[in-house]
Image (spheres, grey):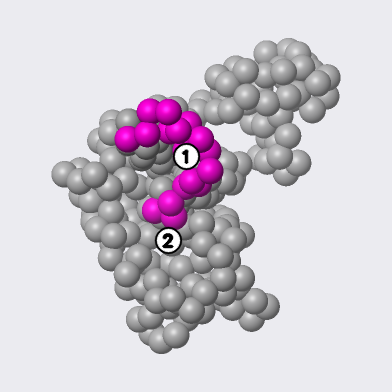
């Protein structure tokens, strides 16, 4: 089905009349044109989707952005305390250290991937969930017909290349160490959903150069790919019908707390 009625996860504008639509309001979403239409313009209040997304609203990239803001506030406070008179000027000209800016860049990447996943028809998405017993977080969880996907978003630049069966690089740097955390998250999710549900992992790179002949590849059961390839993977047919997808999304929502 190309369009359905749902509650907006973000504010938007009706494509027909231009009316502003608040986050949480009901509207008609068309996945083909990627536009929303207010219910008045589509002929009155339509029945809601019986399998509407049952999860807690939480924006992608929330925890990464919060970590950036905390680091920035602490750094600026140290400068202002050490230099009461010139602190403001020093803060303005100093610029952000790379370790701090990386959190903002990561948050931006998570938001873009999150919005992209939310636009895909037929999948249920959860964002930014805390890993049990850890300060780490799962960027995105996607419940699709093929199973539950653990998606780790990376906002990197440079060429993505597979170097061997167990190694890949981005911009010439070995990034294989990104695989084990995803495997850890997959094991935790598997315990929640049970062994009868397939749990898959993906490292989704935003902004990389993949070339003409590069194809998605797998390292230790984790798919290494980019947004368009991820969308194709999520669209694969599988045994999980819409009702079961809704149930699994609700189970994950109750089991994994929001990362902040």
Q: Majority secondary structure of the magenta segment?
A: helix
* Residue 121 among magenta residues: no
Placement of the C terminus among the 4 image quadrants: top left
Label 1 secondary element? helix
Please name the residue shown 34% across and 56% down the image. 199
Label 2 secondary element? strand
Residue 130, position in %: x, y? Answer: 28, 40
Residue 104, position in %: x, y? Answer: 48, 45
Q: Decide if residue 164 is on the left or right side of residue 114.
A: left
Q: Which mark is residue 20?
A: none
The magenta stretch is 82-99
* Total numbered labels placed on residues in the image: 2
Residue marked by disc 1: 90
**Mark pair 1, 2: CA separation:** 42 Å
For label 2, the crowd category at 10 Å Cα-Cα, with few meaning under 14, some 14 to 19 and many 20 or more, is many
Contact (Cβ within 8 Å) of mark 1 with mark 2: no
Please name the residue shown 41% across and 86% down the image. 164
Q: Nearer the viewer, residue 77 or 145?
A: 77
Q: Is residue 233 visible?
A: no
**Residue 82 sits above or below residue 46 on the image:** below
Residue marked by disc 2: 202
For label 1, the crowd category at 10 Å Cα-Cα, with few meaning under 14, some 14 to 19 and many 20 or more, is some
């Amino acid at each position: 089905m190309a369009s359905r009625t749902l509650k907006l996860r973000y504010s938007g504008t009706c494509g027909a009349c231009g009316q502003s639509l608040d986050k949480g309001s009901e509207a008609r979403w068309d996945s083909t044109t990627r536009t929303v239409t207010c219910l008045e313009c589509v002929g009155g209040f339509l029945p809601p989707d019986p399998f509407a997304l049952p999860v807690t609203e939480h924006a992608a990239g929330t925890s990464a952005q919060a970590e950036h803001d905390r680091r920035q506030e602490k750094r600026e406070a140290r400068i202002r305390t050490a230099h009461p008179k010139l602190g403001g000027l020093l803060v303005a000209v100093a610029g952000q250290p790379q370790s701090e800016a990386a959190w903002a860049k990561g948050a931006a990447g998570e938001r873009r991937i999150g919005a992209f996943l939310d636009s895909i028809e037929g999948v249920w998405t959860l964002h930014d969930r805390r890993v049990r017993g850890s300060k780490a977080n799962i960027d995105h969880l996607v419940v699709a017909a093929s199973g539950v996907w653990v998606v780790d978003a990376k906002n990197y630049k440079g060429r993505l290349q597979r170097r061997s069966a167990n190694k890949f690089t981005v911009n010439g740097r070995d990034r294989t160490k990104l695989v084990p955390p995803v495997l850890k998250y997959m094991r935790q999710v598997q315990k929640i959903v049970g062994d009868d549900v397939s749990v898959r992992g993906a490292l989704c790179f935003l902004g990389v150069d993949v070339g003409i002949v590069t194809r998605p590849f797998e390292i230790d059961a984790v798919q290494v790919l980019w947004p368009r390839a991820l969308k194709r993977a999520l669209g694969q047919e599988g045994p999980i019908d819409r009702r079961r997808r809704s149930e699994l999304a609700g189970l994950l929502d109750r089991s994994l707390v929001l990362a902040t």
